Every structure is written in C-alpha cells, then in structure tokens.
Amino acid sequence: MSTSAELIEVSERRSAHNYHPLPVVIHEAHGAWVTDVEGKRYLDCLSGYSSLNFGHGNPKIIEAAQEQLKNLTLTSRAFYHDQFAQFCAGLGDLTGKDMILPMNTGAEAVETAIKVARKWGYEVKGVAPEQANIIVMEDNFHGRTTTIISFSTDPDAHDGFGPYTPGFRIVRYGSAEAIREAIDDNTVAVLVEPIQGEAGVLVPPDGYLTEVRRICTENNVLMIADEIQSGLGRTGRTFACDHEDVVPDVYILGKALGGGVVPVSAIAADEDVLGVIKPGQHGSTFGGNPLACAVGIAVIDILNTGEFQARAARLGEVLHARLRELAGKGVVAVRGRGLWAGVDIDPALGTGREVSKALMARGVLAKDTHGSTIRLAPPIVISEEDLVWAVDQLAAVLETL
C-alpha cells in the first residue's frame, strides 16, 4: 500500500465509518503545510480542529516531547513524577485557578467537569441527592460519550444511542434570559462554549458571557466554560472568555494543550470546587502522564509569551476582512473571532463538502459542517501571505461554481 487510493480503500474497508474524511492521505507536515503520500502540498486550514494552534512540528514542543521520551513516559497516578508539579502549577497560573485535574481527551475533561459540578452541588451547595441539574445549550458540541450526547441536539450525535443520561436542561444559545428562566434550586452549573465551534463557529451576542457570569454568581451556580476549541490563543486572546473579561468557575481545556503531539486535557478550578474530589473518586491511568505534562509545559511556556495570542488577533483581522469581501459572491455569512471563521456558502452553489473538495484540489484543506458551512482555523504560525492565498482559493472556487 503506497498510493492514496490504495490506502483510502483499505481504510474504508477495515475501519468503522464514524468519520467521512476528505480523500487526502497526509504523510508529513511542517508549520501550516502538509504533504500527501504522492508529494502534493496543502495548506492546512483546519489545524486538527484547533489542536495544532502552534503549527505542525512546532520545534519547542517537539524538543520537549523528544527529551521526555528518552526519560519517562508513564508512571500512572500511583506515583508522582517530575513533570507533574510544573504542569499543574503552570496551567493553574495561566488560568488563574488553584488546582488542575488532568485527563487525556476533551470529552474526558467535559465528563470530569460534569462529575465535579454534581459533587460540588451535593457537598457544597446542598442540593438533595440525585436531584442536580446542569443547564446546557442548543447546538452544543462537547464530545460524543454517552452522557454528553444525551444533551446533544445534533441528530447524528444523539439519535439511536439511548437510553440517555438525565440531569440536563437545554436552552437557546446566546440567550441569557433563557438560562435565567431555566435555573432552579437544584441547578449546579451552566455549561457553555464561549464560541460554538462544531455548530459553525457561532459567536454569541456581545455581553452574553458577562450576563451568564452574573446569573451564575447570583444563583450560586458554577459557570463552566468549554474552551477546548476556543481557548489557548485561537481567538486572539488566551481564552475566548477573555474578550469579555469573564472568568468562569471551571475551564475545560484540551486539543491545543497537547500541541498536536499527544492528547492532553484538563479542567481548572479553585480549591473550593475541585477540592470536592477525593482519592478513588475520579482518575485516568494516562491522565497527567510525564510525556503529556512535558508537552503541556512547553505549550504553557509558548502561551505565556503572548506572541501567539497577538498573532491570532492580527491575522484574524486579515482573515475576516478578506472573507467579508466575498459576501454576495457565493458567501452568505461569515462568523468568528481571531483566526477562526465559519463561512456559510450559498446552498445554490453547492454543499460545504463540495466546496471543501474543490478547495482541496487547489491545495487548501478545510472542512464542512452542517451542510453549507465550512470552517477555517489555520495554525497560528501561518504567514499572512499564505492566509490571503487560502482565501483567494476560496474566492476562485466560488467563482467557478
């Protein structure tokens, strides 16, 4: 097996069809560019759904991983290891929180936040046993575990996997009033994406997060911000919540925290929240492993310079200005913040997948969602020249269609 066609055929035949990839087989990658097995280069404008904010093969991250691979990769949490303290302290300082609970995948971190919120509700807030509820948003995407899909409004993620986990109340995204109306004495948390990525990079109205913070404080409810995609520099700030100077009670982090090298996730909260978890009540053999922590430390060091946040803000202005020029020329709407955009294509021209395949043919990799929307989220290391070139390819595709 050496050609793309051969590799795709075997992949389709021997793996479950839980994804529908574009027909490209990537062999190597550096910075914002990837190369397929035939040697054709593509500009990556997806970044592993924001897992590669700092670029493919970021030298600082790769060096940290290689050094750690020589020494120690896993101890389990049965023992301490020499990377754990620095990772937890560094991430705690970055988030401004007392404590960190590290896991592996984003979905695991969301599940962790749900468990912590419920336990906090029972032990601190005084909610009666088994009565806790969490308010969530329509069109959310927090992962695909059984509990998480129980409160998904996406039929593909939700339907056919019941019975579903109770304890969630779904309200309209962007409406603080809907949250206020849904809260009762048994509400322990509001779980919200500051920007809904999978839904099409939906940015809520100005002031929404500020009002959510106020409502949670007034009602003694935890505000949980899922910053797995929106956080760690993507929107031009360290966290998307920073655009409204909002500090949630719990941050959920993942994707870019692993630098595109290993899965790393975590929740961050103060001791009065995370302190409810005691030994044996939650864990992961690989959560907070030495390799993950070494990579995470490198990522934190990168973010502490502020360079990538500023770069995402500057290049984001370029991206959105150029995309807005396509309005009425095959583009119906553009949303997003920083180096992250959802672009609604005129359905009369084609589906989002058709546009993504046409872009691929022109050397740009992007991905569709919800029919006619494509998402653009290139690595923050992308050059301005390459970024403009990518949007020019979209313009050319639309003109052709």
Image: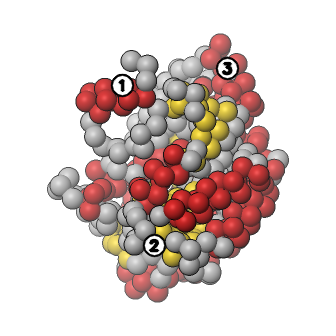
Q: Amino acid at mark 1?
A: Glu
Q: Earlier in the sequence, mark 1 or mark 2?
A: 1
Depth check: give the residue in front, 1 or 141: 1
Label 2 crowding class (10 Å Cα cut-off): few <14, some 14-19, many 20+?
some
Q: Earlier in the sequence, mark 3 or mark 2?
A: 3
Depth check: give the residue in front, 397 or 321: 397
Q: x%, y% of residue 144?
A: 34, 50
Give the residue pinned by disc 1.
6
Depth check: give the residue in front, 282 or 298: 298
Can you tell which mark lies on residue 219?
none
Up the image or down, 157 lies above or below 212; here it is above
Q: Is residue 355 visible?
A: yes
Q: Quadrant of the N terminus?
A: top left
Q: Secondary structure at mark 1?
A: helix
Q: Amino acid at mark 2?
A: Asp
Q: x%, y% of residue 300?
A: 72, 42
Q: Quadrant of residue 311?
A: bottom right
Label 3 crowding class (10 Å Cα cut-off): few <14, some 14-19, many 20+?
few
Q: Secondary structure at mark 3?
A: helix
Can you tell which mark lies on residue 66?
3
Q: Secondary structure at mark 2?
A: loop
Give the residue pinned by disc 2.
346
Label 1 crowding class (10 Å Cα cut-off): few <14, some 14-19, many 20+?
few
How many numbered discs sit on the rendered protein?
A: 3
Residue at 51% from the left image edge and 62% from the top image edge:
400
